[in-house]
Amino acid sequence: MMLEGKVAIVTGSGGGIGREIAIAMAKAGAKVVVNDVGASLGGEGFSETPAQQTKAIIEQAGGQAAISTDSVASWASAQKIVQCALDHFGRIDIVVNNAGILRDQIFHRMTPEDWDAVIAVHLNGSFYVSRAAATHFRQQESGAYVHITSTSGLIGNFGQANYAAAKLGIVALSKSIALDMKRYNVRSNCIAPFAWSRMTSSIPAETPEQKARVERIMKMGPEKNAPLAVFLASDAAKEVTGQIFAPRMHEIFLFSQSRPIRSVHSEGGWTPEKIAEVALPALRPSFVPLERSGDVFSWDPV
Protein backbone atom coordinates (compact mmCIF):
# COMPACT_ATOMS: atom_id res chain seq x y z
CA MET A 1 0.00 0.00 0.00
CA MET A 2 2.64 2.49 -1.15
CA LEU A 3 0.05 5.25 -1.64
CA GLU A 4 -1.95 4.77 1.54
CA GLY A 5 -3.57 8.03 2.61
CA LYS A 6 -2.81 9.86 -0.62
CA VAL A 7 -5.22 11.37 -3.15
CA ALA A 8 -4.47 11.12 -6.86
CA ILE A 9 -5.89 12.73 -9.98
CA VAL A 10 -5.43 10.69 -13.15
CA THR A 11 -6.52 12.54 -16.27
CA GLY A 12 -7.71 10.56 -19.25
CA SER A 13 -8.34 7.54 -17.02
CA GLY A 14 -11.52 6.33 -18.69
CA GLY A 15 -9.52 3.72 -20.58
CA GLY A 16 -6.12 2.49 -21.69
CA ILE A 17 -3.00 3.49 -19.80
CA GLY A 18 -4.83 6.06 -17.68
CA ARG A 19 -7.36 3.51 -16.49
CA GLU A 20 -4.64 1.03 -15.55
CA ILE A 21 -2.73 3.71 -13.63
CA ALA A 22 -5.89 4.78 -11.77
CA ILE A 23 -6.69 1.18 -10.85
CA ALA A 24 -3.12 0.49 -9.73
CA MET A 25 -3.00 3.63 -7.61
CA ALA A 26 -6.27 2.68 -5.94
CA LYS A 27 -4.91 -0.80 -5.22
CA ALA A 28 -1.85 0.88 -3.70
CA GLY A 29 -4.13 2.72 -1.27
CA ALA A 30 -4.77 6.04 -2.99
CA LYS A 31 -8.17 7.68 -3.32
CA VAL A 32 -8.50 8.46 -7.01
CA VAL A 33 -10.20 11.14 -9.06
CA VAL A 34 -11.01 9.51 -12.38
CA ASN A 35 -10.96 12.32 -14.93
CA ASP A 36 -12.16 11.70 -18.48
CA VAL A 37 -14.44 13.57 -20.86
CA GLY A 38 -15.24 10.39 -22.79
CA ALA A 39 -14.30 11.86 -26.15
CA SER A 40 -13.24 10.00 -29.26
CA LEU A 41 -9.58 9.49 -30.11
CA GLY A 42 -9.73 12.69 -32.13
CA GLY A 43 -11.30 14.63 -29.26
CA GLU A 44 -14.91 14.73 -30.43
CA GLY A 45 -17.97 13.93 -28.34
CA PHE A 46 -18.63 13.51 -24.63
CA SER A 47 -19.60 10.58 -22.42
CA GLU A 48 -19.51 9.87 -18.70
CA THR A 49 -19.44 6.11 -19.32
CA PRO A 50 -15.65 5.57 -19.52
CA ALA A 51 -15.03 7.35 -16.22
CA GLN A 52 -17.93 5.53 -14.59
CA GLN A 53 -16.53 2.20 -15.73
CA THR A 54 -13.12 2.92 -14.23
CA LYS A 55 -14.71 4.09 -10.98
CA ALA A 56 -16.76 0.88 -10.83
CA ILE A 57 -13.67 -1.28 -11.28
CA ILE A 58 -11.88 0.56 -8.48
CA GLU A 59 -14.83 0.30 -6.11
CA GLN A 60 -15.44 -3.36 -6.88
CA ALA A 61 -11.89 -4.01 -5.71
CA GLY A 62 -12.53 -2.11 -2.47
CA GLY A 63 -10.98 1.21 -3.48
CA GLN A 64 -12.34 4.74 -3.41
CA ALA A 65 -12.86 6.90 -6.46
CA ALA A 66 -14.67 10.00 -7.64
CA ILE A 67 -15.49 11.10 -11.18
CA SER A 68 -14.55 14.32 -12.96
CA THR A 69 -15.70 14.84 -16.53
CA ASP A 70 -14.19 18.31 -16.87
CA SER A 71 -11.77 18.98 -19.72
CA VAL A 72 -8.09 19.53 -19.05
CA ALA A 73 -7.92 21.90 -22.02
CA SER A 74 -9.01 25.09 -20.27
CA TRP A 75 -7.86 26.91 -17.16
CA ALA A 76 -11.32 27.04 -15.56
CA SER A 77 -12.16 23.37 -16.07
CA ALA A 78 -8.72 22.25 -14.86
CA GLN A 79 -9.42 24.13 -11.63
CA LYS A 80 -12.61 22.09 -11.29
CA ILE A 81 -10.68 18.83 -11.65
CA VAL A 82 -8.46 19.70 -8.70
CA GLN A 83 -11.44 21.01 -6.75
CA CYS A 84 -13.12 17.64 -7.27
CA ALA A 85 -10.30 16.00 -5.32
CA LEU A 86 -10.61 18.55 -2.53
CA ASP A 87 -14.41 18.26 -2.37
CA HIS A 88 -14.44 14.46 -2.22
CA PHE A 89 -11.24 13.62 -0.37
CA GLY A 90 -10.02 16.83 1.27
CA ARG A 91 -6.57 17.02 -0.31
CA ILE A 92 -4.45 16.35 -3.40
CA ASP A 93 -1.08 14.57 -3.43
CA ILE A 94 -0.59 13.20 -6.94
CA VAL A 95 -1.30 14.44 -10.45
CA VAL A 96 -0.94 12.12 -13.44
CA ASN A 97 -1.19 14.07 -16.69
CA ASN A 98 -2.30 11.38 -19.10
CA ALA A 99 -5.22 12.87 -21.07
CA GLY A 100 -4.62 13.08 -24.78
CA ILE A 101 -6.03 13.00 -28.29
CA LEU A 102 -4.57 12.30 -31.73
CA ARG A 103 -4.92 14.23 -34.98
CA ASP A 104 -2.21 12.53 -37.03
CA GLN A 105 -1.38 14.02 -40.39
CA ILE A 106 1.73 14.40 -42.53
CA PHE A 107 3.20 17.83 -41.79
CA HIS A 108 2.48 19.61 -45.07
CA ARG A 109 -1.18 18.60 -44.75
CA MET A 110 -1.67 19.36 -41.06
CA THR A 111 -4.30 22.01 -40.42
CA PRO A 112 -4.18 24.71 -37.74
CA GLU A 113 -7.20 23.00 -36.14
CA ASP A 114 -5.30 19.71 -35.89
CA TRP A 115 -2.35 21.49 -34.33
CA ASP A 116 -4.35 23.56 -31.84
CA ALA A 117 -6.54 20.66 -30.68
CA VAL A 118 -3.61 18.39 -29.82
CA ILE A 119 -1.55 21.12 -28.16
CA ALA A 120 -4.61 22.19 -26.13
CA VAL A 121 -5.15 18.78 -24.58
CA HIS A 122 -1.61 17.44 -24.18
CA LEU A 123 0.56 20.47 -23.45
CA ASN A 124 -1.87 23.13 -22.26
CA GLY A 125 -3.83 20.52 -20.33
CA SER A 126 -0.71 19.30 -18.53
CA PHE A 127 0.11 22.88 -17.55
CA TYR A 128 -3.42 23.78 -16.47
CA VAL A 129 -3.93 20.76 -14.21
CA SER A 130 -0.39 20.92 -12.83
CA ARG A 131 -0.73 24.61 -12.09
CA ALA A 132 -4.09 24.13 -10.42
CA ALA A 133 -2.56 21.56 -8.08
CA ALA A 134 0.66 23.53 -7.51
CA THR A 135 -0.92 25.96 -5.05
CA HIS A 136 -1.95 23.09 -2.79
CA PHE A 137 1.35 21.23 -3.20
CA ARG A 138 3.22 24.37 -2.19
CA GLN A 139 1.06 24.96 0.87
CA GLN A 140 1.42 21.39 2.13
CA GLU A 141 5.08 21.19 0.99
CA SER A 142 4.63 17.87 -0.76
CA GLY A 143 3.32 16.47 -4.01
CA ALA A 144 4.20 14.39 -7.05
CA TYR A 145 3.59 14.91 -10.75
CA VAL A 146 3.75 12.10 -13.30
CA HIS A 147 3.49 13.34 -16.87
CA ILE A 148 2.94 11.06 -19.83
CA THR A 149 5.29 11.89 -22.69
CA SER A 150 6.09 9.80 -25.78
CA THR A 151 9.01 8.52 -27.82
CA SER A 152 7.31 10.29 -30.73
CA GLY A 153 8.57 13.49 -29.14
CA LEU A 154 11.76 12.13 -27.56
CA ILE A 155 12.90 10.37 -30.75
CA GLY A 156 10.49 11.11 -33.61
CA ASN A 157 7.74 9.65 -35.77
CA PHE A 158 5.98 10.23 -39.08
CA GLY A 159 2.81 12.29 -39.27
CA GLN A 160 2.80 13.48 -35.65
CA ALA A 161 4.24 16.99 -35.62
CA ASN A 162 1.49 18.25 -33.29
CA TYR A 163 1.66 15.24 -30.94
CA ALA A 164 5.47 15.10 -30.91
CA ALA A 165 5.80 18.83 -30.22
CA ALA A 166 3.31 18.60 -27.36
CA LYS A 167 4.96 15.54 -25.84
CA LEU A 168 8.45 17.04 -25.97
CA GLY A 169 7.01 20.24 -24.54
CA ILE A 170 5.70 18.20 -21.61
CA VAL A 171 9.27 17.05 -20.90
CA ALA A 172 10.40 20.66 -20.62
CA LEU A 173 7.38 21.50 -18.49
CA SER A 174 8.16 18.63 -16.14
CA LYS A 175 11.78 19.69 -15.78
CA SER A 176 10.75 23.27 -15.06
CA ILE A 177 8.30 22.11 -12.39
CA ALA A 178 11.01 19.92 -10.84
CA LEU A 179 13.40 22.88 -10.68
CA ASP A 180 10.90 25.48 -9.47
CA MET A 181 9.16 23.36 -6.85
CA LYS A 182 12.02 21.31 -5.41
CA ARG A 183 12.15 23.73 -2.46
CA TYR A 184 8.61 22.61 -1.55
CA ASN A 185 9.43 18.88 -1.74
CA VAL A 186 7.41 18.57 -4.96
CA ARG A 187 8.66 16.10 -7.57
CA SER A 188 7.99 15.95 -11.30
CA ASN A 189 8.88 13.09 -13.66
CA CYS A 190 7.90 11.80 -17.10
CA ILE A 191 6.92 8.38 -18.39
CA ALA A 192 7.12 7.51 -22.08
CA PRO A 193 4.88 4.42 -22.17
CA PHE A 194 4.95 1.49 -24.53
CA ALA A 195 1.52 -0.10 -24.85
CA TRP A 196 -1.18 -1.14 -27.27
CA SER A 197 -4.15 1.15 -26.75
CA ARG A 198 -6.40 3.37 -28.83
CA MET A 199 -3.58 5.94 -28.88
CA THR A 200 -1.38 3.47 -30.77
CA SER A 201 -4.08 1.69 -32.76
CA SER A 202 -3.67 4.21 -35.60
CA ILE A 203 -0.06 3.17 -36.29
CA PRO A 204 0.17 2.08 -39.95
CA ALA A 205 0.47 -1.68 -40.53
CA GLU A 206 0.80 -2.00 -44.29
CA THR A 207 4.39 -3.02 -45.02
CA PRO A 208 6.01 -6.14 -43.48
CA GLU A 209 8.18 -3.89 -41.29
CA GLN A 210 5.17 -1.92 -40.06
CA LYS A 211 3.22 -5.10 -39.35
CA ALA A 212 6.14 -6.49 -37.34
CA ARG A 213 6.32 -3.27 -35.31
CA VAL A 214 2.60 -3.34 -34.53
CA GLU A 215 2.85 -6.98 -33.49
CA ARG A 216 5.58 -6.04 -31.02
CA ILE A 217 3.50 -3.22 -29.57
CA MET A 218 0.41 -5.40 -29.27
CA LYS A 219 2.30 -7.67 -26.88
CA MET A 220 2.51 -4.83 -24.38
CA GLY A 221 -0.69 -4.17 -22.46
CA PRO A 222 -1.34 -0.75 -20.91
CA GLU A 223 -1.11 -2.29 -17.43
CA LYS A 224 2.67 -2.68 -17.88
CA ASN A 225 3.09 1.07 -17.33
CA ALA A 226 1.15 1.32 -14.07
CA PRO A 227 3.77 0.03 -11.57
CA LEU A 228 6.26 2.73 -12.55
CA ALA A 229 3.61 5.43 -12.20
CA VAL A 230 2.71 4.18 -8.72
CA PHE A 231 6.36 4.12 -7.70
CA LEU A 232 7.06 7.64 -8.96
CA ALA A 233 4.01 8.94 -7.09
CA SER A 234 5.04 7.26 -3.83
CA ASP A 235 7.36 8.36 -1.04
CA ALA A 236 9.74 5.61 -2.12
CA ALA A 237 10.65 7.93 -5.03
CA LYS A 238 11.19 10.99 -2.82
CA GLU A 239 14.65 11.59 -4.31
CA VAL A 240 13.58 11.06 -7.94
CA THR A 241 12.68 14.20 -9.87
CA GLY A 242 13.27 15.73 -13.29
CA GLN A 243 13.73 12.33 -14.94
CA ILE A 244 12.31 10.59 -18.02
CA PHE A 245 11.51 6.88 -17.87
CA ALA A 246 10.16 4.45 -20.44
CA PRO A 247 8.58 1.16 -19.33
CA ARG A 248 8.54 -1.43 -22.11
CA MET A 249 7.08 -4.84 -21.25
CA HIS A 250 9.41 -5.92 -18.41
CA GLU A 251 12.10 -3.33 -19.17
CA ILE A 252 12.52 0.15 -17.70
CA PHE A 253 14.61 2.67 -19.62
CA LEU A 254 16.03 5.92 -18.30
CA PHE A 255 16.26 8.49 -21.09
CA SER A 256 19.09 10.93 -21.57
CA GLN A 257 18.37 14.64 -21.78
CA SER A 258 19.75 17.24 -24.17
CA ARG A 259 23.35 18.13 -23.38
CA PRO A 260 26.29 19.34 -25.54
CA ILE A 261 28.00 16.37 -27.14
CA ARG A 262 30.79 17.98 -29.19
CA SER A 263 32.24 21.42 -29.86
CA VAL A 264 34.62 23.21 -32.20
CA HIS A 265 36.49 26.46 -31.62
CA SER A 266 37.92 29.07 -33.96
CA GLU A 267 40.13 31.66 -32.32
CA GLY A 268 39.42 34.23 -34.99
CA GLY A 269 35.67 33.58 -35.13
CA TRP A 270 33.60 31.89 -37.80
CA THR A 271 32.51 32.67 -41.30
CA PRO A 272 29.89 30.61 -43.16
CA GLU A 273 32.66 29.28 -45.41
CA LYS A 274 34.87 28.30 -42.47
CA ILE A 275 31.95 26.53 -40.81
CA ALA A 276 31.48 24.50 -43.98
CA GLU A 277 35.19 23.75 -44.26
CA VAL A 278 36.16 23.15 -40.62
CA ALA A 279 33.19 22.90 -38.26
CA LEU A 280 30.97 20.64 -40.35
CA PRO A 281 33.52 17.84 -40.84
CA ALA A 282 34.35 17.94 -37.13
CA LEU A 283 30.73 17.87 -35.96
CA ARG A 284 29.19 15.56 -38.56
CA PRO A 285 30.35 12.28 -36.92
CA SER A 286 28.33 13.23 -33.85
CA PHE A 287 25.12 14.16 -35.69
CA VAL A 288 22.00 12.45 -34.33
CA PRO A 289 20.52 10.13 -36.98
CA LEU A 290 17.11 10.97 -38.43
CA GLU A 291 15.37 8.06 -36.71
CA ARG A 292 11.89 7.18 -35.56
CA SER A 293 10.91 5.49 -32.32
CA GLY A 294 10.54 2.16 -34.13
CA ASP A 295 14.08 2.42 -35.50
CA VAL A 296 15.60 2.87 -32.05
CA PHE A 297 13.45 0.25 -30.30
CA SER A 298 13.73 -2.33 -33.06
CA TRP A 299 13.90 -5.49 -30.97
CA ASP A 300 11.10 -7.51 -29.45
CA PRO A 301 9.86 -6.49 -25.97
CA VAL A 302 11.63 -8.38 -23.21
Image (cartoon, helix red, strand yellow):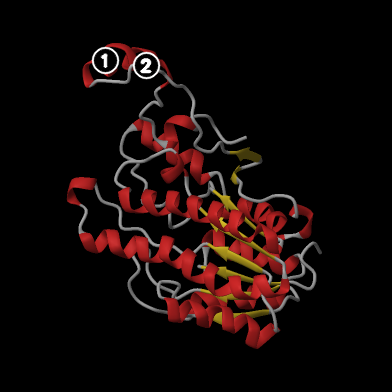
Describe the element under mark 2 as helix, strand or loop: loop
Q: Residue furthest front?
A: 268
Describe the element under mark 1 as helix, strand or loop: helix
Q: Position of residue 300 (x, y in %)?
A: 54, 32
Rendered image: mark on residue 135: none
Rendered image: mark on residue 266: 2
Figure quadrant of residue 273: top left
Q: Position of residue 83 (x, y in %)?
A: 58, 83
The residue located at (53%, 76%) in the rendering is 51
The residue located at (39%, 78%) in the rendering is 46
Q: Earlier in the sequence, mark 2 or mark 1?
A: 2
Viewed as shown, does residue 38 lie left or right of 255? left
Q: Position of residue 94 (x, y in %)?
A: 65, 67
Viewed as shown, does residue 283 lie left or right of 15? left
Residue 278 in view, yes or no: yes
Figure quadrant of residue 229: bottom right
Q: Residues within 10 Å of mark 2 (few under 14, many from 20)?
A: few
Q: Which residue is mark 1?
A: 274
Give the amino acid at mark 1: Lys
Comparing labels 2 and 1, the label whose residue is closer to the camera: 2
Image quadrant in which the N terminus is located:
bottom right
Image quadrant in which the C terminus is located:
top right
Q: Residue furthest bottom?
A: 87
Q: Is residue 104 above or below residue 252?
A: below
Marks 2 and 1 close (CB-CB < 8 Å): yes
Q: Is residue 93 above or below residue 147?
A: below
Residue nearer the viewer, 227 or 147? 147
Viewed as shown, does residue 64 lie left or right of 206? right
Residue 54 in view, yes or no: no
Viewed as shown, does residue 8 lie left or right of 209? right
Q: Is residue 151 above or below residue 31?
A: above
Question: Disc 2 and disc 1: Cα gap in Å?
Answer: 9 Å
